[in-house]
Amino acid sequence: MKNCHTVLFILMSFILLILLAVAQEQVVATNPLLESNLEELTTSVYCYCGCMRETIKHCVCGVAQQIETDFHNRLSAGGTVQQIRADYLSQHGTQFSALMPAQGFNIVAYAMPVVIIVLLGVIVFLVLRSKRRATLLDSTVPTEPHTLVSASQYDQIEEELERYKQRR
Amino acid sequence: MAELGQAAIYLSVFSCLWAMAMLWIGLRHNNYNAVVSGRNGVVGTFALITLATGALIYGFVTNDFTMKYVVEVSSYDQPLLYKITALWGRMSGSLLFWLWLVTFFGALVVWTSQRATDYLADYALIPISIVQLFFIILVTGLVEGVYNPLERLPNGAVARDGAGMNPLLQTPSMAFHPPSLYVGFVSLTVPFAFAIGTLLSGKTGSEWIFRSRRWMMASWLVLTLGITLGGNWAYRELGWGGYWAWDPVENASFMPWLLGTAYLHSAMIQEKRNMLKLWNIILITLAFEFTLLGTFITRSGIVSSVHAFAQSDIGHYFLMFIGLSTLGVIALLAYRWNDLKSPNRLESLLSRESAFLLNNWMLVGLTLIILWGTLWPIITEGVTGAKVAVPESFFNQVVIIPGLLLLLLTGIGPITSWKKLTPSNFRRMFAKPIVLGLVGGILAWVYLALKGHTTAIYSVLCVFAGVFVLAAISGEFYRGARLRAKRQETTLFDGLIRLVQRNKRRYGGYIVHIGIVIVYIGILGSKGYFLLESKGLQLEESMEVGKYTLTLKNAFQEEHPNFSLGGVVLAVEKGGRSMGTMRPARAFYHKAGQGDQDTIESAIRHFGLNDLYIALGPLPENVPAHVQSGGIVSVQAYHNPLVNFVWLGVTVMVIGGLVAIFEKHPKGNV
């Protein structure tokens, strides 16, 4: 009888374990918050395996798989995205961050393209204006015959010229 | 043979110096014999470097493992094609290949300019020889950081076998991608040399523009092809489902392309209106210097890159050469300053000249932005001490607006008349493209909103600009073809053919613009709306990506001479309908240059314009046994919409470029 209870206890424990595992599996599979956190995390850091500039999500090496499993476990254990990301970067280096928020010194990186375009725009504008003004002021500058023609009209003129040359 | 090659390299130093000296003396003192001797020196340098290159290739083919470079990048069982392509597999060989190309183009300039008094081509040979001398010095092995590619192993040693080339480079596309990039880069030396030749000679007209036009077109075309082949290689070989990631090496090749594109447009202003003489010289100089700057960035190792296979510490030589050559050009420009003033002026701000200037603004702006992003890790480390990597998203964010404006300009330029755009012309030429663009944009917005993408503003703008450009260029073709058909009493199609034949350059250019629109649409779809799903699969297990279901059905293992290929068979279904199977794999190279290595052999299946792309995670060497015993295979599947538009668009661009290049200019071509 005692043996029977023991066997029953082991069996029940086993079933309970299986049920727990299945339940856990379902939680993992259907936990959208955990999945979205994992997505955020795996796209925010690069893999350090040597596949340069490939995020954990995109990298198909074994290292990336291990890291993803580790991130998954840590998120399941209650870790936050920021905390796990900070740990990863402190361990492997800040060059493995796949995010470049427009904060701190990075603001310069984001501002400079605007400065470049604006500065070049000002130069082009000044060149255009000076060239235009010079034309208006300097009536002695020799220019080609004034033709306000569209591309197709220009084409027609070219064709006529060609025909004229052939006739000669 | 190796010793003969080494001797040829050393001798080429003298032939190069001889060419420079004789050309200079002959041109300054009108001594024709000296000029001819200088030309022969250029051809002689080519012959010597060809001999050296041939000696190295002979070493590869005959498995001469007494040669250091052959040991590093080749092996007995490496296929013949990859033995030959090993020439550019690492630093020393790639520099020799670069040098061979410079000497080849130098000789080509001599052969195509056989007139007795071709002062411009002869002056152009001087800067070409200077560039040759720089590369000859690098491959002599006398400078620190790079050894002579024909050097033997020390103490008469013979290696039993070579280490073999990096497996990532043992692909057919790698046989064509690096040489086409090199050809694109190196051939830019010729138009640059013609610009310097015009400054040296003091005859600062537009002849150099006419003479170098075909060279420039060819460089641009080959560079376009080279960049695309690189993207295609990355797409097939790296397993991340993309073709462009703003990697420093990619940027290094893209920047000269942008500057070359700007030059092709601004040169037209000088041809048609005799304006922008100074600017054109600056632009071609920038394009040339950026080929060296790109090489410096990728070879020096100052920024990390995914495919800098030939990295070493020779970057500072490149930097020195860039500095010296730039100073030389600045000095020449200052010396000829007064001669470079353009006699003609701009008649209106609304003209094709202005549109081309705006195009130059955007192209040069984009180049500087990309350079800024590429160098940002160095700047940050220098200022804050922190190491950073610039993500793809940064580049995507900062280039999107200039990129869209550039797209719009590809339509505005062709339909804007030279000199002045009148209000009536504007209405006639712009009304339909604008209306059609708006309709296209609205339809795209509705379609994307129905698909759940409610904030896709850039996509809508891209579709608007794309439709606008297509409508504008189609209108140009239609009007011209109709005119010809009417005049020559023939069909519209015949009129179209005659139209293109009569003005290959212009209409070839328009075809290139159509190709650009197609590329933009491809980028929009594949970068903006791709799907990625990852899952570990066991036998008969399934996963979904978009509308496709993938089921693991089987595994396979194949033995090849220098690698074994292991992978899985995945059944593909769409809506319950079988779409066949796909076989992603990994190749295990046992004799890889960097130790045992495996590469991802992605499976790519085209479904119309979209791709289903599958890459596998790490696998054990015996894949079938692993799968049959219930092992898990990590599968990464991408759905890349419209990605094939990228390759299609580039094909159209190349066709357009080929059409344009065959036009003979009345004032002559090289």
Image (tube, coloured by chain):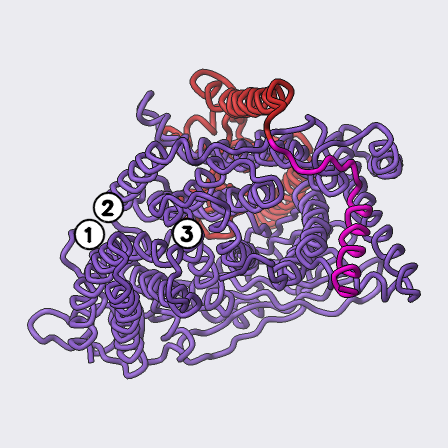
CB atoms of marks 3 and 1 within 8 Å = no
What kind of residue is marked 3? Phe
Mark 3 neighbour density, 10 Å: few (under 14) some (14–19) many (20 or more) = many
Quarter of the image where the C terminus of chain A is located: bottom right
Any magenta on residue A143?
Answer: yes
The residue at which mark 3 appears reads as: B194
Q: Nearer the viewer, residue B501 or B442?
A: B501
Residue B481 is situated, as x and y percent measured from the top left of the image, at 85, 57
User: What is the magenta segment's predominant secondary structure?
Assistant: helix
Any magenta on residue A158?
Answer: yes
CB atoms of marks 1 and 2 within 8 Å = yes
What kind of residue is marked 1? Gly
Establish if A107 lies above or below A52: above
In the drawing, what numbered circle is on residue B145? Answer: 1
Spatial CA distance of label 1 from label 2 is 10 Å
What kind of residue is marked 2? Tyr
Provide the residue span drawn in magenta: A142-168
Disc 1: host chain: B
